[in-house]
Image (tube, rainbow, N blue to C red):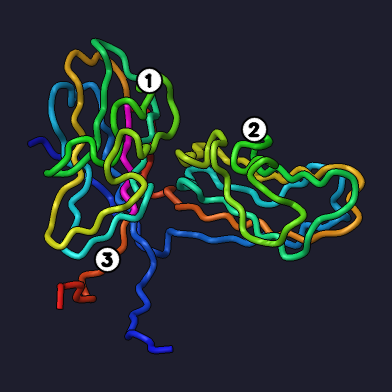
Amino acid sequence: MAQSAYVTMGGPKCFTSEAITEDHTNTTVVAAELPAGAWVPPYGVTVYVAEAFAGGTPKLNVGDDTTADGFVDEDDITEATPGCYSGTAANAAYSDTGRYYSSADTVDVTVSAGLTGGTAYVFVQYYDFSDRDLAAN
Amino acid sequence: MAQTSRKVLGPGAYKTIVSRAITEADTNATTELFEIPASSFVPPFGVSIQITEAFAGGVPSIDVGDADADGWIDTTDITEGTTGTYTGDGTAFAPTGKYYSSKDTLDVTLSASLTDGTAYVILRYWDMTACDLAAA
């Protein structure tokens, strides 16, 4: 059987955002800066609600510059209940496929208006493929 | 756009642990496999079970969880009589992952009357002790 060349990659890395709180209400914040060549595996982005959100109708969406809810959609999160939440295929385009970034991008969190309380952290697991040229041949 | 400062954990913070052999000797009991340290994040689908020898005797069932005994892998996710790798599907924690702010244990519960079988549980988690993820 013919074999294609392969490269064994190193282990994963994980961004943890700083606390996302009511201070970020009605804004979009950068949770992670992905370098060019980053690959986020399926279910690689998780929202950890450490303190229940309150005020207005609490909503968090996590995505990138292309799709604001690409990784975790507000419908995948019960913002008023502490716990971990990941995206679902039904709501978040990248959640069950993962996503490769040929150029640098950011993972962003869109925070709803009117929040008066709450704390969340976003975990972004990824592999750095920057030393492996994945260009089309 | 506002930015939050952030931390990056390297591969050294990513841990993978394989349990001891789980066999018919553990029948009809709940057994602690690992202690999960405080400030650990087990990612989605971070717990798997490898059945290397088919289980037999009684009606074999295996659950893997913490205080929620089938929170990671439910017996309905496993064909205990068939060797292979199994991961939770619709369980409480498998699709979402779980952050442990305080230490806990990962436990396996085996059904009664087992006469044979061998399995290993594989746990993957991130050590986030450097991140201080308290409510703000």
Taking B27 as reference, is B125 left or right?
Answer: left
Q: Position of residue A54 (x, y in %)?
A: 31, 14
First in sequence: mark 1 vs mark 3: 1
User: Which kind of residue does numbered mark 2 sit on?
Assistant: Asp
Look at the image and tell me whether residue A87 can be seen: no
**In the foreground, A31 or A69:** A69
Q: What residue does disc 3 label?
A: A128
Q: Say which residue label 1 marks.
A: A52
The stretch of residues the image draws in magenta is A119-125
In this rendering, which labeled residue sits more in front, label 1 or label 3?
Answer: 3
Specify whether A18 is left or right of A51: left
Q: Position of residue B118 (x, y in %)?
A: 78, 61
| Residue at image point 56% right, 47% down | B37
Same chain for the residues under marks 1 and 2 in the image: no
Amino acid at dot 1: Ala
The lab-note entry on whether marks 2 and 3 share a chain reads no
Q: Residue A58's spot in the image, x, y percent?
A: 27, 18
Q: Chain of mark 3?
A: A
Near mark 2 (Cα within 10 A), the count class, few <14, some 14-19 or many ≥20, is some
Q: Which residue is mark 2?
A: B68
Callout 3 amino acid: Asp
